Image: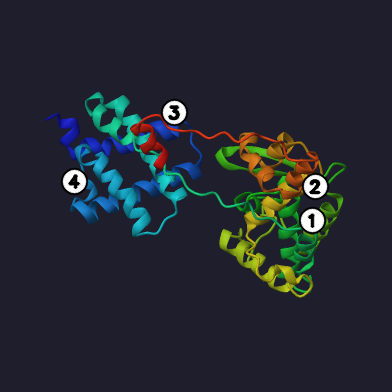
Amino acid sequence: MNSLLTNPAEFAALVQRFFAERLLQQKNASPRTIAAYRDTFRLLLSYAELKIGKPPTKLALIDFDVTMVLNFLEYLESERHNTVRTRNARLATIRAFVHYVALQCPEALLLTQQIQAIPMKRFEKPMLGFLSREEIQALLDAPDEQTWCCYRDRILLTPLYNTGARVSELIGIRVTDVELTASPSVRLHGKGRKQRTVPLWKETAVKIRHWLAYANLKVEQTLVPTRRGLPMTRSNVAARIALAVSSAVKHCPQLQDRKVTPHTLRHTTAMHLLQAGVDITIIALWLGHESPVTTHGYIEADLSMKERALATIALPPEIGQVHYHPSDDLLKFLESL
């Protein structure tokens, strides 16, 4: 058998070249992409050592077959309790690697084709959750500004709703990214090194201007730091939003049983823009979506738009009933499924 398939050193070299040459040099992948791919390989190599008894230094390309990959994907869902989205993201990483392997090692073509044939798993997409205007206003007003942290939380919540930023984009905003002159705006650093500029309401600009004077932040600092001046984490933001929701319940009881996450505020921004008549392509640019197709989910979630469409039809169309009768046993079988 070809030594490229059986020599562990060859497999290790392929993995290293995939990261150093393919991702870093050729594709210039972002640090977040590199980190996500790295974590997939960490899990995969740990799984191989656990299940087939081979440490990473002993693993050869021949061991990296379709059976191991399928078992690894099953392990992610059944034992690590990962979601289907996460399972598919791990599979996307593996597919990218075997595509590179097929180019570098034609002898492994059959092995790579079998892995690339593994399909992405479909999953139910829940309806997008968003807040009403009354609910979002209660949430924005919840921090009382009597403490440094509460003052900071208002600055956290207001731009999050104003811009529709992802939580990673919010905690990445530095003071130098904020423009507070005649046309207030903020520069967001999105996924894949993509940047976009989003306008700020005058009220948001005023709040940020007061916050910068109050907190005495330097230009290189993040706009919403921790009490120690460090960038906030995702869990920090989620915890502060949960605290604001618990305070807002007093004035807006319907928030009592609502699960409000940073992404809920992003959905809320999109829905309110849509309900205000903003074109979906503008909303896609506002949110940093690569394609307006991603933004179509907000139209699906807007019941009021569907009700208005339904109201344009006075009566349901009259359609005569047509019954289909299968003509043979095969069709009857298919019909019974």
Question: Which mark sits nearer the N-terminus, 3 or 2?
Answer: 3
Looking at the rendered structure, the secondary structure element under dot 3 is helix
Question: Which mark sits nearer the N-terminus, 1 or 4?
Answer: 4
Q: Which residue is mark 4?
A: 58
Looking at the rendered structure, the secondary structure element under dot 2 is loop
Towards the viewer: 333 or 287: 333
Q: Which residue is mark 2?
A: 200
Residue 11 placement: quadrant: top left
The N terminus lies in which quarter of the figure? Answer: top left
Q: Which amino acid, by three-letter code, is at mark 2?
A: Leu
Marks 3 and 2, how far apart at CA:
37 Å
Question: Which mark sits nearer the N-terminus, 4 or 2?
Answer: 4
Q: Which amino acid, by three-letter code, is at mark 4?
A: Lys
State the image coordinates of residue 44 (x, y, percent, origin top left). Answer: 31, 49
Q: Which amino acid, by three-letter code, is at mark 3?
A: Gln
Crowdedness of circle 3 by 10 Å Cα count: few (<14), some, many (20+)?
Answer: few
Q: Which residue is mark 3?
A: 26
